Structures are given as C-alpha cells and as structure tokens.
Amino acid sequence: MNQDFYNNFHKLTHRSKKIINPHNFTYRNTLKIIEKYLKKNNEILDIGCGSGAIDLLLGSRGFSVLGIDVSNKAIIECNKSAENLGLSKLCKFTDSNFEKFNIEKKFDLIICSEVLEHIQNDEKAILKIKSLLKPDGILIVSVPSINAPLHKLGLTNKFDQRVGHLRRYDEKILKNLFTKNKLTILEIKKTEGI
C-alpha cells in the first residue's frame, strides 16, 4: 500500500465536528452489522479506518477502539476529531500499513470495511487478522462486489483504479478465502445495487 497515494486520497479528510448518525447513508449497512455483534466491553480494531467516523461513533457509546490507516493525513485528522469530541481516551488512531502493523493485543471485534481489495495479498491479510482476533472474536468485512450492476456494465473501472482497488469479490471468492483460513462465516449480506 502506497502511503502517498492514500494521503492524496484523504487530502479532503478533515476532523469531525460531530458524531455521525447511525443511519448515515455511507455507513448505515456496515453499522447495522456491527450493531448486531457488539457486546459490552468489546475492544475493537478498525483496519483502514479512514476518517474514523465509525470509530468515533463506537467510542461515543463507550467502546474502546483502535483505528489504523496507511494515510498519516487521515490519522492526524482522526486524532484531532477524537480530541475535539472528548473521545481520545476511548478512540486511539495510528498510521500503519496493515501489512506491517504489529501489536500484541487481541480484539473482540475487528472491522475491515472496504480494505481487502486494496491489499496485495488478501489471504495473508486474513491470516494476520485471524491472529489478532480473540478466540470468540468477530470479524466484519465489506468489499466491493464484482456483481455490482455498475461494475458489470464496465462503469467502475476508472473509479476502481482511482481509489486503488486491486480486485473485487463475489460471494464464492470470499467464502473460499475465509473457509480456507478456518474462519466460520456467520452471515453474508449483499448490497450490490446502486
């Protein structure tokens, strides 16, 4: 993952002045899934946290969250947001390329939303994520679909290139990736429409 590329991608990312609404159009589907698996005292890792919007919402609810992103520009803004919103004790942010990320801690819940498609070796990434999960931990993943109508029409190629997508996934590819690495799939939710 190229830090300069993602710093440029996040050049318009600025500190949050308020917590997002759980029904926010951008995050609503992911938040619905996260909500189902949250338990009291969960410690959460968000891989590729971007602007930190999800993490700040979870922190505002009392959860301990560590957000990482390859963009140090995004992380600077995340830390400013956490400080401005009084959440810097619960929400910690660090810039790190996930492939080089090292921590001894294990997490109850790991969020990997719109990230796997940016990582060169997604299987190696899944194994690393698995090593960071507690034995009964939950991993929530979202990825762009190869079956999305706009993609099937060939209308996402420039977008995928612009945002650094290396691939898209379908249900079979994802199932294989997880089962091959001995992760149990609890549910799959498709949102392939516009």
Image (tube, rainbow, N blue to C red):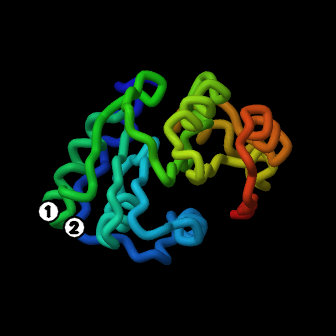
Q: How many marks?
A: 2
Tell me the residue that label 2 is attached to.
Answer: 17
- Near-viewer residue (167 or 194): 167
Find residue 144 and report its horizontal and vertical position in percent. Answer: 67, 47
Find residue 81 and report its horizontal and vertical position in percent. Answer: 21, 57
Point out which mark residue 144 bears. none
The quarter of the displayed image where residue 164 is located: top right
Identified at 40% across, 55% down, the residue is: 43
- Near-viewer residue (28 or 59): 59
Name the mark nearer the viewer: 1 or 2. 1
Element assignment for label 2: loop
Left or right: 10 as drawn, with respect to 168: left
- Near-viewer residue (192 or 41): 41
> Separation of disc 1 and disc 2 at Cα?
7 Å
Residue furthest to the right = 172
Check whether the beta carbons of the residues at disc 1 and disc 2 lie within 8 A of each other.
yes
Tell me the residue that label 1 is attached to.
Answer: 84
Element assignment for label 1: helix
The residue carrying pointer 1 sits among few (fewer than 14), some (14 to 19) or many (20 or more) residues within 10 Å by Cα, namely: some
